Each structure stands twice: as C-alpha cells, then as structure tokens.
C-alpha cells in the first residue's frame, strides 16, 4: 500500500513539474473569462480616451499616479495632447508608459482662456482587452470637479469659470473609480 501512495505522489510531483514548465512557456492561458498570466502587468499600457467636443484649439493634460502612490500629481507624470477645435466629437487619447499601473489621474481640460466649455460624451479607460466605459450620464459618480469647472444642466457640458483672474479647469478620478481600476485591471 505504501508503494502505491509513493508512486502516486511521484506521479503528481512529475505532473505538476511538467504543468509548471508548460505554463511558463505559454505565459498566459485563458480559462473561461479568466486569464492566468506570469505577470498581469504585462498586458500592455493603459489608455485614457476622452470622447469630447472642443470648440477651440487647446491643450489637454493628463496627470497620473501609479497604484498605491501617495505622492501628489507632478510634472514628471504628465502627458499632453494638442486638440484641434471642432464642432464634432473627437477622441483625445492618452497612452501611459507600459510599465505604469494606473492608480488615479487628473484631466486638465484645456489651457486656452478662450475655451468657455467642452462637451464630454464619455471617458474610456482601457488596458489590453479590459475596458471601463464611463458615459456622460454618470461622470459625476467617478470624477470630482475643481472650482473652475461647472457641470451645466446639459449632460456632458462642462463650463469653465474664471475666479479672481485665474482659470485652471480639471477633473480628478474619485476613489470609487480608482478602486474599479484596481479590481478590473
């Protein structure tokens, strides 16, 4: 009886060894809706895309923090995009460096003082095959607006305010969205 248990244990060890070798060569295998990977952070870079109407030429910026970071937003972790003024919806896409795991972010909605408003149809956060789609109707649930941004009665319309000669409209991801990013990616 002891020899049978010993042989079964040896078979299991050998089988497990070959399984681990096979898994290391394949790297990532799918099982249902789950992906078992060597390193889940190798799925590609995060992308944050705004589907927006911007009437005037402008520059949008995305400041980002990595997961679990306690440092404030900084110029070292900032992406800039020139945006052409158009009356039609356009995509403004920010692609983060591939080694960054997004923790939270801030979207600066323009530096052009002539820009009085923008219309955000939706914001999409994507990495690999995973995606979070935030339509205009629930932007309030996922973003905090600073004092220079007023969301008007029309869904998705953001009006920019000038206070004491200053203007710096931006929105910041709420902890709810940050947690959703952590869970889904």
Image (cartoon, rainbow, N blue to C red):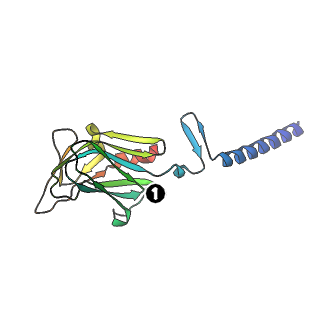
The structure residue drawn at horizontal position 42% and vertical position 45%, both measured from the top left corner, is 126
Q: Nearer the viewer, residue 165 or 68?
A: 165
**Horizontal side, residue 114 vs residue 21: left or right:** left
> Quarter of the image holding residue 139?
top left
Q: Nearer the viewer, residue 11 or 109?
A: 109
Report the label total: 1
Residue 133 spot, x, y in % from top left: 36, 40
**Label 1: element kind:** loop
> Quarter of the image holding residue 87?
top left
Residue 49 spot, x, y in % from top left: 35, 47
Residue 31 spot, x, y in % from top left: 59, 36
Q: Quarter of the image containing the N terminus?
A: top right
Q: Which residue is mark 1?
A: 100
User: Up-down: is 22 above or below 168?
Assistant: above
Q: Residue furthest top?
A: 32
The structure residue drawn at horizontal position 45% and vertical position 43%, both measured from the top left corner, is 184
Q: Nearer the viewer, residue 79 or 8?
A: 79
User: Up-down: is 100 above or below 8?
Assistant: below
The structure residue drawn at horizontal position 57% and vertical position 33%, both measured from the top left corner, is 32
10 Å crowding of disc 1: few (<14), some (14-19), many (20+): some
Residue 67 spot, x, y in % from top left: 43, 55
The structure residue drawn at horizontal position 48% and vertical position 41%, both measured from the top left corner, is 129
Q: Residue furthest left?
A: 164
């Amino acid at each position: 009886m002891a020899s049978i248990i010993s042989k079964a244990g040896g078979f299991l060890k050998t089988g497990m060894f070959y399984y681990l070798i096979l898994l290391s060569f394949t790297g990532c295998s799918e099982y249902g809706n789950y992906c078992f990977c060597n390193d889940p952070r190798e799925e590609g870079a995060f992308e944050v895309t705004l589907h927006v109407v911007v009437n005037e030429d402008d520059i949008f910026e995305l400041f980002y923090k990595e997961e679990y970071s306690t440092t404030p937003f900084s110029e070292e972790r900032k992406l800039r995009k020139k945006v052409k003024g158009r009356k039609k919806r356009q995509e403004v896409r920010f692609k983060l460096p591939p080694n960054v795991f997004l923790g939270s972010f801030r979207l600066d909605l323009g530096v052009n003082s002539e820009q009085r408003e923008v219309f955000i149809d939706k914001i999409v956060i994507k990495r690999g095959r995973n995606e979070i789609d935030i339509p205009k109707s629930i932007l309030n649930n996922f973003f905090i607006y600073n004092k220079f941004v007023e969301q008007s009665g029309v869904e998705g319309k953001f009006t920019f305010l000038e206070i004491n000669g200053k203007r710096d409209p931006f929105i910041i991801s709420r902890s709810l969205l940050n947690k959703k990013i952590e869970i889904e990616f």
